[in-house]
Image (spheres, rainbow, N blue to C red):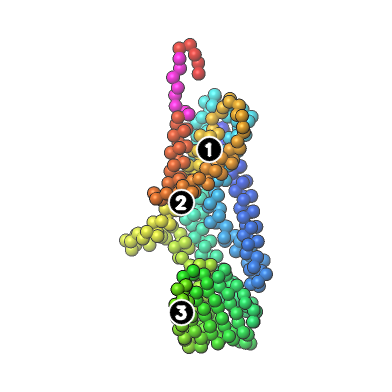
């Protein structure tokens, strides 16, 4: 690797990493503040709060990962143009180093975001579900205060009448309103939390399960004993989706073994792969915007960092509503950025006696 290529790559990566680290720390603090009920209401420690904030971070980091790379790249290119280094690169035959440095940053970014989306995020989702189930089980078995309504998770409220010396709960009540189509109520004379070493189970005795629908239909099932996984009370949307807790390698291996590629699996793999294309697209667009020096004096100086944010916002909206899939916006950025770079670098004809 040439010294110029190494210098430019280090410059591009440094700005992107610093911005990414600062945003990750700020988002972690925001997640901790949003989940502070884990300490104040559910009786957990600060370490549980910090871990929960950390496990909810990967989906957010994936969303702004390519934005950080784009802003870091554009800031570095603006600094090069401000001190005339970019002009020297173009006039002294250093364009090859500029392209290589950008390719190194894009390649590292693609590898990083694919690692996040395909492996780290599913593992974080799995661990977060386990942690939420542990918190819910601890809340029901020991922390839940008698004769006081407590929200276990948004949409689920519990109430107990008392607690026996052996940990048995008297007069258990739970109201589940997470599903807009069905309101489910659990009523039992007694309850107990047990575990098989992997899952927590809430054993309800001598009670009833009531379901009410928006159209007024009401059903009730009485039981002598009813076992329900604590996971069903710990998730904001009910039963967790195992697809989002499984890494892409396992999804592909299971699909090859069964010979069936379900639309849900294909959609999940497509969404995860689109993140790598977004990194390539934003790098090409930023290179087209700020990689070529200009002697024109702009009447209004528009911060290119804001332009990168607007491009990312437009790409997300375009991809979300496009019938062609989640990669539509990323492919559009690649075509627009790559086409502009090719146009800017094409050989130009020279007139006799005039040097351009």
Residue 179 seen in the figure: yes
**Label 2 crowd bin: few (<14), some (14–19), many (20+), radius 10 Å:** some
Q: Are marks 2 and 3 in contact (CB under 8 Å)?
A: no
Task: In this rendered view, identify the residue nearer to me: 158 or 242.
Answer: 158
Residue at the far left in the pictured view: 259
Task: In this rendered view, identify the residue nearer to me: 255 or 347.
Answer: 347
Label 2 vs label 3: CA separation?
38 Å
Circle 1 is placed at which residue position?
A: 286
Label 1 vs label 2: CA separation?
22 Å
SS assignment at label 1: helix
Q: Nearer the viewer, mark 1 or mark 2?
A: 2
Task: Provide the major secondary structure of the magenta segment.
Answer: loop
Which picture quadrant has residue 143? bottom right
Residue 10 seen in the figure: no
Q: Residue at x 62, y 87 (%)?
A: 164
Circle 3 is placed at which residue position?
A: 218
Q: Residue at x 56, y 27 (%)?
A: 294
Task: In this rendered view, identify the residue nearer to me: 78 or 89.
Answer: 78
Task: In this rendered view, identify the residue nearer to me: 107 or 2.
Answer: 107
**Label 3 crowd bin: few (<14), some (14–19), many (20+), radius 10 Å:** few
Residue at the far front in the pictured view: 215
Q: Are marks 1 and 2 in contact (CB under 8 Å)?
A: no
Q: Residue at x 51, y 40 (%)?
A: 283
Q: Which mark is residue 320?
A: 2
Mark positioned earlier in the residue sequence (2 or 3)? 3
- Residue 247 magenta: no
Q: Nearer the viewer, mark 1 or mark 3?
A: 3
Q: Nearer the viewer, mark 2 or mark 3?
A: 3
Q: Which residues are magenta?
A: 344-351
């Amino acid at each position: 690797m040439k010294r110029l290529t190494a210098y430019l790559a280090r410059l591009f990566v440094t700005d992107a990493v610093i911005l990414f680290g600062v945003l990750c720390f700020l988002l972690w603090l925001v997640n901790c503040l949003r989940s502070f009920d884990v300490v104040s209401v559910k009786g957990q420690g600060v370490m549980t709060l910090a871990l929960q904030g950390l496990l909810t971070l990967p989906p957010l980091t994936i969303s702004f990962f390519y934005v950080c790379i784009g802003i870091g790249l554009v800031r570095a290119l603006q600094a090069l143009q401000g001190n005339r280094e970019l002009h020297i690169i173009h006039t002294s035959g250093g364009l090859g180093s500029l392209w290589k440095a950008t390719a190194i940053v894009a390649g590292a970014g693609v590898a990083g975001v694919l690692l996040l989306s395909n492996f780290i995020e599913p593992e974080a989702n799995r661990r977060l579900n386990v942690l939420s189930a542990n918190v819910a089980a601890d809340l029901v078995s020991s922390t839940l205060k008698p004769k006081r309504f407590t929200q276990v998770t948004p949409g689920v409220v519990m109430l107990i009448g008392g607690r026996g010396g052996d940990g048995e709960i008297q007069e258990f009540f739970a109201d589940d309103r997470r599903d807009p189509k069905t309101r489910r109520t659990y009523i039992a004379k007694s309850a107990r939390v047990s575990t098989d070493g992997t899952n927590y189970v809430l054993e309800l005795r001598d009670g009833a399960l009531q379901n009410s629908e928006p159209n007024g239909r009401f059903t009730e099932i009485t039981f002598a004993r009813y076992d329900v996984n604590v996971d069903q009370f710990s998730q904001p949307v009910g039963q967790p989706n195992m697809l989002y807790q499984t890494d892409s390698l396992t999804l592909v291996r299971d699909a090859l073994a069964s010979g069936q590629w379900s639309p849900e699996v294909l959609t999940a793999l497509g969404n995860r792969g689109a993140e790598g294309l977004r990194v390539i697209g934003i790098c090409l667009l930023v290179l087209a915007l700020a990689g070529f020096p200009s002697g024109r004096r702009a009447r209004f100086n528009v911060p290119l960092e804001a332009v990168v944010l607007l491009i990312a916002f437009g790409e997300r909206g375009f991809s979300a509503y496009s019938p062609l899939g989640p990669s539509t916006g990323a492919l559009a950025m690649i075509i627009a950025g790559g086409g502009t770079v090719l146009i800017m670098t094409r050989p130009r004809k020279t007139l006799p006696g005039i040097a351009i």
